């Protein structure tokens, strides 16, 4: 029996006595690509951040890679295997040069400086960004920063990817290059995007976060290749209600 990589039960987050979401439950299995859809302000980014412990003001249960996570030490271990692409690349990049940024994660995983640099260069090359290795990070364009931010995540070789608006700031050519690369990856993913083409290309199933509740959504692909996401009326009440294919 395949076990979920992430299992969330009755998750709730409140800010300033306002409920962001409540009773959220779902499982993410290997090789799944889950589209998390909803309006601006629905709490999608907050949900992603909560999953890896960047927001620990929550109730409910998060189990990541078989380990129940509640304390920071537990989330620190989880973040070694669950890569998070922030919506704003400036939140992810903090080293002077690109190669330093991309090598930072592998160094923290215990690789030698030489091994970390080799890993960073290989990931940059896979994204078509090898020539940027020695560039000054803060001088990059928004789209260039987006690709480098993804490189910092992939260099950690995570088992799960949490992608918050992965194509932000990319032109059409860069977006297509990014989507081709993501589509080739074996990792399970949770994808937040307002760009329908991203979900058309990547997602295998979808859920809708609306009015603080998570509902199943049905994905329809038609011959003209547009993706339509429809919410079911029933709220997802437990992780066991998810259909695993």
Image: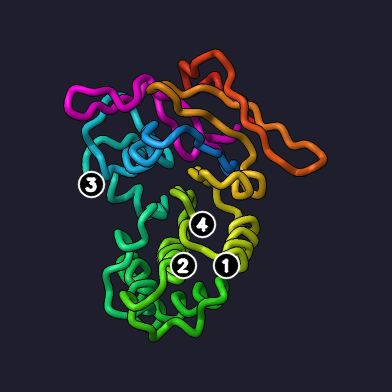
Q: Earlier in the sequence, mark 3 or mark 4?
A: 3
Q: Give the quarter of the image for residue 146.
A: bottom left
- Marks 1/3: CA distance? 37 Å
In three-dimensional space, the C-alpha distance between marks 2 and 3, rounded to whole angstroms, equals 33 Å
Residue 126: say if magenta: no
The residue positioned 36% from the left and 39% from the top of the image is 51
Q: Which residue carries the number 4 mark? A: 167
| Circle 2/circle 4 CB separation < 8 Å | no
- Dot 3 falls on a residue whose secondary structure is helix
In the image, residue 118 sits, relative to residue 17, either above or below, namely below
Label 1 vs 3, first from the N-terminus:
3
Q: CA distance from mark 2 to mark 4?
A: 8 Å
Residue 26 visible in the displayed image: yes
Q: Is residue 205 left or right of residue 167?
A: right
Please give the residue where the numbered disc 3 appears in the rendered image.
73
Residue 173 x %, y %: 62, 68
Determine if the magenta segment contains residue 13. Answer: yes
């Amino acid at each position: 029996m395949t076990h979920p990589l992430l299992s969330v039960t009755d998750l709730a987050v409140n800010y300033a006595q306002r409920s962001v979401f409540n009773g959220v439950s779902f499982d993410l299995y290997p090789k799944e690509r889950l589209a998390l859809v909803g309006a601006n302000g629905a709490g999608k980014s907050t949900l992603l951040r909560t999953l890896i412990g960047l927001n620990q003001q929550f109730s409910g249960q998060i189990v990541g890679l078989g380990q129940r996570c509640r304390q920071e030490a537990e989330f620190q271990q989880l973040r070694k295997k669950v890569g998070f692409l922030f919506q704003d690349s400036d939140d992810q990049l903090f080293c002077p040069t690109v190669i330093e940024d991309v090598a930072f994660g592998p160094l923290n995983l215990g690789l030698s400086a030489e091994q970390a640099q080799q890993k960073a260069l290989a990931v940059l090359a896979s994204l078509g960004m090898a020539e940027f290795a020695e560039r000054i990070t803060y001088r990059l364009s928004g789209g260039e920063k987006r690709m480098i931010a993804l490189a910092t995540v992939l260099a950690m070789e995570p088992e799960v990817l949490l992608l918050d608006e992965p194509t932000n700031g990319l032109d059409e050519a860069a977006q297509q290059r990014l989507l081709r690369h993501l589509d080739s990856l074996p990792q399970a993913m949770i994808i937040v995007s307002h760009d329908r083409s991203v979900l058309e290309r990547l997602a295998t199933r979808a859920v809708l976060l609306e009015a603080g509740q998570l509902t199943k959504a049905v994905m329809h692909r038609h011959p003209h290749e547009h993706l339509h996401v429809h919410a079911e009326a029933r709220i997802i009440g437990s992780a066991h209600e998810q259909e695993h294919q």
